[in-house]
Amino acid sequence: MVLLISAYWIMITLMLLVSMFFIHGFIGGFIHHLLNKNAIKKRRKGQTIKESLTFSRFKDVLPKSCLIFYYFIIVLHFVFLLVISIFIMIDCSADSIRKVFGFLFCFDCVWISVVWLLFCSPNSKSYAYDRWFKKETKKIKNKRNNTGR
């Protein structure tokens, strides 16, 4: 029983790492879609690991929905690790733990598939971010004095 519980802990931790890797890469690609290389280089200069994991230097360009979804995925996995721990402490059956794990596994498969299907591009190796999010272009004001001549 203890070995089985340890296996679920390890699998949920691996699912957390895979989910973080996937969504972090997705948001990182989205940042590259929105900003040019020089802007990214300037923002990343001196960036700490905490800032990299929380995207704190890019919060002004990222949609809040992306950040909320990112934090939701991370918190959800930690909540499920906590639920598994509680199930171990109250000596719950392995079937209950299997159901909790199965729900999280199905949820991960669904959200990764949905994101991939919404943003996949058959002609490119990267995601088609411009399909859903347009780049904001700054309008350049004409510096010439337009007096009608």
Image (spheres, grey):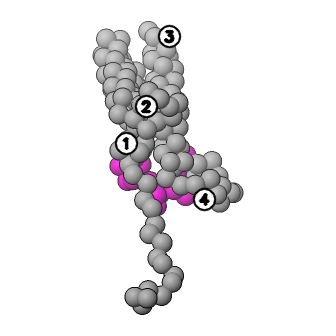
- Alpha carbon distance from label 4 to label 2: 26 Å
Q: Secondary structure at mark 2?
A: loop
As measured in the structure, the alpha-carbon distance from the residue carrying label 3 to the one carrying label 2 is 42 Å
Circles 3 and 2: CB atoms closer than 8 Å? no
Q: Which residue is mark 2?
A: 121
* Crowding near the residue tagged with mark 1, few <14, some 14–19, many ≥20 C-alpha atoms within 10 Å: few
Residue found at x 33% / y 25%: 110
The residue singled out by tag 3 in the image is: 3
The mark closer to the camera, 4 or 3, is 4
Which quarter of the rendering shows the N terminus? top left
Amino acid type at image mark 1: Arg
Is residue 69 among what the camera can see?
A: no
CA gap between label 1 and label 4 equals 23 Å
Which residue in the protein does label 1 denote? Answer: 131
Of residues 87 and 35, which is closer to you in this image? 35
* Image-based side of 137 in relation to 42, left or right: left
Give the structural element (helix, strand or loop) at label 1. Answer: helix
Q: Main secondary structure of the magenta part?
A: helix
Location of residue 94 by image quarter: top left
Q: Amino acid at mark 3?
A: Leu
Q: CA distance from mark 1 to mark 2?
A: 9 Å
Circle 4 is placed at which residue position?
39
Residues at marks 1 and 3, CA–CA distance in whole angstroms: 46 Å
> For the magenta stretch, what is the residue range?
53-68
Viewer-closest of 58 and 127: 127
Q: Amino acid at mark 4?
A: Ala
Circle nearer the N terminus (1, 4): 4
